[in-house]
Image: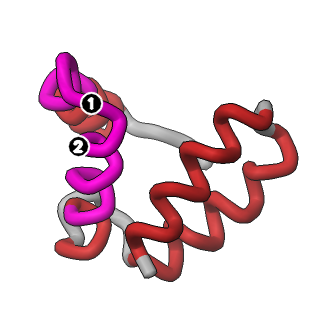
Amino acid sequence: MEFNPQDMKKMSQIAQRMKGKSEDEVVKELAEMIRSGQGGLTPQKAEQMFQMILPMLSNEQKKKVQKLLKELR
């Protein structure tokens, strides 16, 4: 998966908006962005992507991704 400069700028802006928020707030906001299409992913595509990367994550990271997946469902 390649990222162009616009994608990188968008991700940076999203990261800035998330600063200072609790984990629950971030999960809810990310889920809403994905559902509304603002994240550039459909919920189905996001779930496919997360399922692919889950085996590469630490247990703590997996819990956070699973929390987001649960929020998307």
**19 sits to left or right of 68:** left
Which is nearer the eye, 57 or 14?
57
**Crowd tier of the residue under label 2, counting other residues whose Cα lies within 10 Å: few below 14, some 14–19, many 20 or above:** few
Position of 56 relative to 50 (above/below): above
From the image, tell me which residue sits under label 1: 22
Residue corresponding to mark 2: 25
* Image quadrant occupied by the C terminus: bottom left
Q: Is residue 26 magenta?
A: yes
Tell whether label 2 touches label 1 (CB within 8 Å).
Answer: yes
Going by the numbered disc 1, the residue's amino acid type is: Ser
Looking at the rendered structure, the kind of residue marked 2 is Glu
Judge by depth and name the residue closer to the eye, 65 or 52.
65
Question: Is residue 30 within the magenta segment?
Answer: yes
Give the residue at x 20% y 27%: 21
Label 2 residue SS = helix
Residue at the image position 46 percent from the left and 39 percent from the top: 3
* Position in image of residue 38 (x %, y %): 19, 61
Q: Which region of the structure is painted magenta?
A: 15-32
Q: Is residue 40 left or right of residue 70?
A: left
Residue 35 in picture, x, y percent from top left: 27, 74
50 w.r.t. 11: above or below: below
- Spatial separation of the CA atoms under disc 1 and disc 2: 5 Å
Residue 8 occupies quadrant: top left
